[in-house]
Image (cartoon, rainbow, N blue to C red):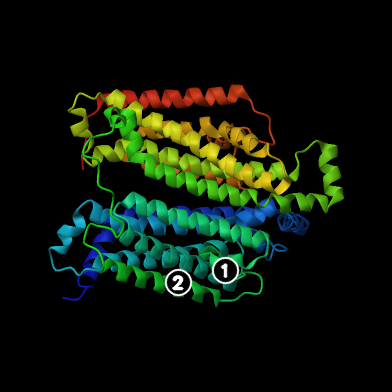
Amino acid sequence: MTTLRGTGQLLRLALRRDRVRLSIWVLAVVGLTYFSGTSMGAAFPTQHDVLSYGRSVAGSPALIAMTGPPLGLDTLAGIVLNKVGLTAIIGMSLVAILTVVRHTRTEEEEGRSEMLRATVVGRHAGSAAAMLLVAGLSAVMGVGTTYAIIGAQVPAGSSWLFGAGITALGLVFGAVPLVAAQVFTHGRTALGVSIAVLGVAFVIRAVGDVKASWLVWLSPIGWSQATHVLGDERWWPLLVSLVATVLLVGVSVVLADRRDVGAGLVAPRNGSPTASPMLSGPVGLAFRLQRGLLAGWALGLFALSAGMGSLSREVGDMARDNPTLEKYLQATGQASLTDTFFSTMLLIMALLACAFAVSSALRLRSEETSGRLEPLLATGLSRTRWLLGTLLVTVGGTVLLLFVSGLGMGLAYGLVVGDASQPWRLAVLTLVYLPAGVTIAGLAVLLVGWLPRATAVAWAALAFCFVLGWLGGLLDPPQWVQQLSPFWHTPAVPVDDVTWTTLTALTLVAVVLGALGLAGFRRRDITAG
């Protein structure tokens, strides 16, 4: 029997299981790309508006760090790509990572892979099916984004090059978790490592673009953007992505042959013969289950925020090199360019920390469906204590991640400008986003309590907040739509002053959502599987 025997059957099974999930991802990314792109014509109706925006991007390290090299910004098509590129890049990368982990390491961890291999299925069939699924998904996403930006008046040739870059990026970030799935025993670890690789790739690309450095060639995101759509367009950088994909797949095959089914190359440590006193309560147990995830998030956000903080010198230099701009900011009482840069970056860090909050809160549901909750409740532990213990870890972890994000940015900035007060200043200011983060987590708890099969709505709410935070100014939705996001009500520190009334109101909303979720959870049946 060949090692790829049964790949076709497993691919059809994966398509059937994920047909709704993947369709939602494609429609969301392609739809957002289309509607964001077509809105640019109204946002920039004249050539003067286009040129003004192009100059502002070219002179803004923050925007270059977020969107990539400022190419073709003397045209409306260039602005479209500048604005929608990040959405397509992040969406494609995340769905590729999530899909491969779901169909490889998670299948082994939950025992389904072993049962399948008891039939006529080759050793590498599962990995091959997962990679083929991502390859097809990447192609669909690439074609979809191509037609989306063609509809936004981007030339067809440039659109196809952009779409090819998105497809190539999906292949690379499909191969990364394929390797991680061979190394680590648990799906959450493989997922965390893969997302950390994505974060590092983003930081390296951002620093390389701002400093016009060769560093961009160390990032898969940089390879796709090196096609220079609407600039000196070139297809050959995509070969780098294809070669990297082949190499990573080859490495995964070699590693898979060196481990047992269900195990990883990095074996988990043997447990202690006696339980730690920390495990005697629900808080300690919840922390024990999430400490690895929390540590990974903390390290990733610290590295990402430090990378963004290291760009502060370029922001300050731009203001010093433009005396007219500096005088204008002083005369109008507007914040410095550095503080404006930090307000944008801190919002991004807060949204990422909120992703942990949602993931942590939804552990309530995953522990239930895995069947691990019922034995706990049989010991006399009440539902209320268990839920509140998990939420305490959720809130504490979110506080830690926000603080670490501000600390990393402040440390890098403080080293650049020689100001030792910056780490503490930015670390404390970042905490103003805590009420917004726990509000989204409260929504997740509400769903777990009353609509446990609809917990994906919590992730949709976070995506909604991200879109409004990043593209809200250009999409110009009605004010009542913007007000649905708790981040809209949060002061954009360090530019805006802290308003305690608003933060207190958000905190109360979070408490009410959590209390309602607890009430629903206490009344419904526990469901496993």
Residue 15 placed where, x, y %? Answer: 29, 61
> Of 276 and 318, which appears nearest the observer?
276
Q: Quadrant of the C terminus?
A: top left
Residue 352 placed where, x, y %? Answer: 50, 44
Q: Residue at x 45, y 71 (%)?
A: 244
Residue 353 left/right relative to 488? left
> Of 313 and 386, which appears nearest the observer?
313
Number of residues whose C-alpha sits closer than 10 Å to that of mark 2, classed few (under 14), some (14–19) or many (20 or more): some
Query: What residue did someone put label 2 on?
Result: 244
Residue 437 placed where, x, y %? Answer: 49, 35
Residue furthest toward the front?
273
In the image, residue 474 sits, relative to residue 377, either above or below, namely below
Q: Which mark is residue 217?
A: 1
In the image, residue 270 sits, relative to residue 261, either above or below, namely above
Residue 240 left/right relative to 227? left
Q: Residue at x 46, y 59 (%)?
A: 92
Residue kind at label 2, given as amino acid type: Ala
Residue 22's quadrant in the figure?
bottom left
> Of 101 and 35, which appears nearest the observer?
101
Q: Residue at x 42, y 56 (%)?
A: 194
